[in-house]
Image (cartoon, rainbow, N blue to C red):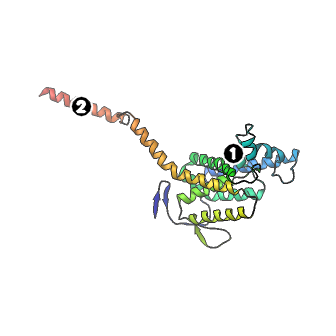
Amino acid sequence: MTYDYYGQGQSRLRFFAERITWGTRRLILANLIVFVGQLIVDVPWGRMPGMAPGGAFVYDWLMFAPGRFLHHFHGFIWQPFTYMFLHASLWHLFRNMLWLFIFGPMVERRLGTRQFLRFYILCGALGVLATYLRLKTPAAPVLGASGAVMGVLMAAAIADPDRQIFLFPFPIPINMRALIFIVVAFDIVSALGGGHTSVATHIGGLAVALCYMKLAPPIRRWVRTLKREHEPPNSNKDPIGEAVDKIFDFEEERRRRQR
């Protein structure tokens, strides 16, 4: 049994996700609402062949387009934050939300809701920047929550590496540590096979989460230590205790004078 900053890790066999938490529920709901919005936008504008729901509007403004974001920068600074809420199809949306539904609650309980939401956005926004490292066609757009979701998966593996799950459709339990290696292996095979999955975004999300989960605890401890060192010596005194001390000091002084 091992212990770490994020809680006690132990081997447990889980068939279903933990009870869904507030932040995870809101993220799933946000993705569903945005996808419905994509479908609605299709009605007046229509979908161009090969494009995700939402057509040219989504393609031009909300997807992450590396070429436009970097080389022809016209203020598209929101794209690293908007692309992760868009999806190419209902199946694409379902896959990502299933991962989030299973592992999101565990990570949210470790980090707390506010930190979890910041962590999710950070993994998605920074993870997609990894596309600049390998894309043969820099203008190829990226959409989907997979970068952020891969970050959640990595955080779950770090928080509880020995937790066991079933990887459908195989009836053999594996632990979270092994699941990370399997995901990376599938991504490598996909990259070598020339698939349409943004493997760089997946790897980027995993890397951001790894850095965050490993660096956040010592940074927080350092900040707390720094704050304590710069606090006045008596800033942590209890006002009631201080008043009692003064009473005893007064009594001691009175007795000394009576001697």
Which residue occupies the foreground of this view, 232 or 204? 204
Residue located 65% across and 49% down the image:
124
Q: Is residue 230 left or right of residue 77?
A: left
Q: Which type of secondary structure does the marked residue at label 1 adopt? A: helix
Percent position of residue 99, x then y: 66, 59
**Could you classify mark 2 by the number of other residues whose Cα lies within 10 Å: few (under 14), some (14-19), or many (20 or more)?**
few
Percent position of residue 227, x then y: 43, 38
Q: Quadrant of the C terminus?
A: top left
Percent position of residue 7, x then y: 49, 56
Percent position of residue 225, x then y: 42, 42
Q: Amino acid at mark 2?
A: Asp
Q: Amino acid at mark 1?
A: Pro
Residue that numbered label 2 is attached to:
249
Give the answer, above or below, for where 1 lies relative to 135: below
Which residue occupies the foreground of this view, 76 or 254? 76
**Could you classify mark 1 by the number of other residues whose Cα lies within 10 Å: few (under 14), some (14-19), or many (20 or more)?**
many
Residue 68 shows up from this direction: yes
Give the answer, above or below, for where 145 lies relative to 241: below
Residue located 77% across and 48% down the image:
139
Which residue occupies the foreground of this view, 212 or 116? 212
Residue located 81% across and 51% down the image:
53
Residue 19 shows up from this direction: no
Residue that numbered label 1 is attached to:
80
Which residue occupies the foreground of this view, 37 or 52? 52
Please identify the quarter of the rendering in which residue 154 is found.
bottom right
Q: Closer to the N terminus: mark 2 or mark 1?
A: 1
Q: Which type of secondary structure does the marked residue at label 2 adopt? A: helix
Give the answer, above or below, for where 236 lies relative to 207: above
